[in-house]
């Protein structure tokens, strides 16, 4: 990714998390100075450099975020309550809806007008076999669809409501907003999706449905965010970033081979699958998805 952010100061909320750490690396490579806005700055010690500093703040405390954003040119609103089985809808909304509102209001108070919101493909009303793009309706309530097989509906709904609120606030507060809708995300340091794939690939055998699963590498998402900040064309636009769809059995076989595992993968053929159309992000942001083999090799080399 050749887009330069030289001299820009960019705040990243949730900078020490899985995706957040990749965002920091991508922004740093593009020349930006990074302010990691996190609850526990000590967790980012391994990322500290001349380009990266940390400030303590919390999504529940707007004043702390206002202070953390002071002097920044842009904010990447990445922090969120991720998929967690036992969290209630109220807990998801507190982080992913109310937290988004506090973040954007803190941006306004701190004089930061440029914001990239990290949303999710979970915001869409998914239909099996129908390509999903930016014109697909967003969730407004509970809805039965194929994505619920892999996604917590409370998480998906809260991300949808949070993004819809963000667009309303962007207009009210005169903010220059871009939304990136990634997922499912995999890559190095991923303790969720990638860890589950690793678990399947290291069994003696595993039975898998023969469906195509969309996968996007964390660094490809991070590079899209960096490009969005560097390119004015992205202002006022939402981008789908679901990556390429891969046969699940092939994914696990490929990972098993890279790990040197003798796992026997049994495939049960099933029709359909979910496919996301990333053409707008490819056109505007210059994204080129890495191959499955390259992405999984990084998972093997850097598991934590």
Image (cartoon, rainbow, N blue to C red):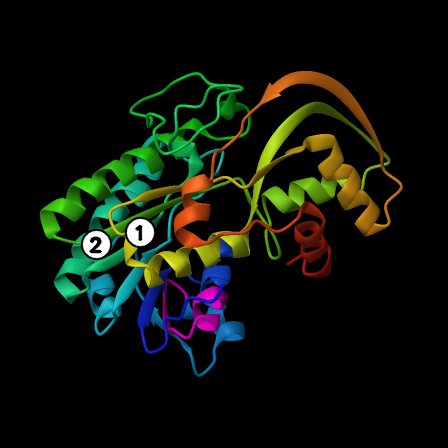
User: What is the magenta range?
Assistant: 25-40
Q: Is residue 6 visible?
A: yes
Q: Secondary structure at mark 1?
A: helix
Badge 1 is on which residue? Answer: 234
**Residue furthest out toward the bottom:** 50
Q: Is residue 260 above or below residue 46?
A: above
Q: Position of residue 75 (x, y in %)?
A: 29, 61
In magenta segment, residue 28: yes
For the point 35% across and 30% down, which residue is it? 157
Q: Quarter-wise, where is residue 228 in the image?
A: bottom left
For the point 31% across and 51% down, which residue is it? 234
**Residue furthest out toward the front:** 283
Tag 1–tag 2 contact (CB < 8 Å): no
Q: Position of residue 254 (x, y in %)?
A: 77, 42
* Residue 66 as seen in the image, left or right of residue 280: left
Badge 2 is on which residue? Answer: 176
Q: Quadrant of the C terminus?
A: bottom right
Q: Position of residue 112 (x, y in %)?
A: 19, 64
In magenta segment, residue 277: no
For the point 47% across and 57% down, which residue is it? 222
């Amino acid at each position: 990714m050749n887009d330069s952010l030289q001299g820009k100061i960019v705040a990243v909320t949730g900078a020490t998390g899985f995706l957040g750490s990749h965002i920091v690396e991508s922004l740093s490579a593009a020349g930006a100075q990074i302010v990691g806005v996190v609850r526990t700055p000590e967790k980012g010690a391994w990322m500290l450099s001349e380009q990266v500093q940390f400030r303590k703040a919390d999504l529940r405390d707007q004043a702390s975020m206002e202070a953390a954003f002071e002097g920044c040119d842009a904010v990447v609103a990445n922090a969120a309550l991720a998929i967690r089985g036992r969290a209630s809808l109220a807990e998801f909304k507190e982080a992913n809806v109310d937290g988004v509102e506090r973040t954007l209001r803190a941006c306004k108070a701190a004089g930061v007008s440029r914001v990239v919101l990290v949303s999710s493909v979970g915001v869409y009303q998914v239909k099996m076999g129908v390509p999903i793009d930016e014109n697909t309706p967003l969730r407004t309530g509970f809805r039965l669809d194929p994505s619920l097989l892999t996604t917590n509906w409370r998480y998906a709904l809260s991300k949808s409501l949070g993004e819809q609120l963000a667009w309303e606030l962007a207009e009210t507060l005169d903010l220059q907003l871009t939304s990136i809708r990634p997922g499912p995300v995999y890559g190095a340091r991923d303790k969720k999706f990638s860890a589950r794939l690793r678990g399947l690939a290291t069994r003696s055998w595993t039975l898998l449905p023969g469906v195509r699963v969309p996968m996007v590498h964390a660094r490809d998402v991070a590079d899209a965010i960096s490009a969005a900040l560097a390119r004015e064309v992205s202002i006022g636009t939402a981008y789908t970033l679901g990556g390429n769809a891969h046969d699940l059995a092939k994914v696990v076989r490929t990972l098993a081979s890279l790990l040197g595992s003798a796992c026997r993968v049994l495939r049960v053929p099933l029709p359909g699958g979910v496919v996301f159309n990333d053409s707008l992000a490819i056109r505007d942001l210059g994204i080129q998805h890495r191959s499955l083999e390259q992405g999984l090799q990084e998972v093997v080399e850097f598991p934590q």
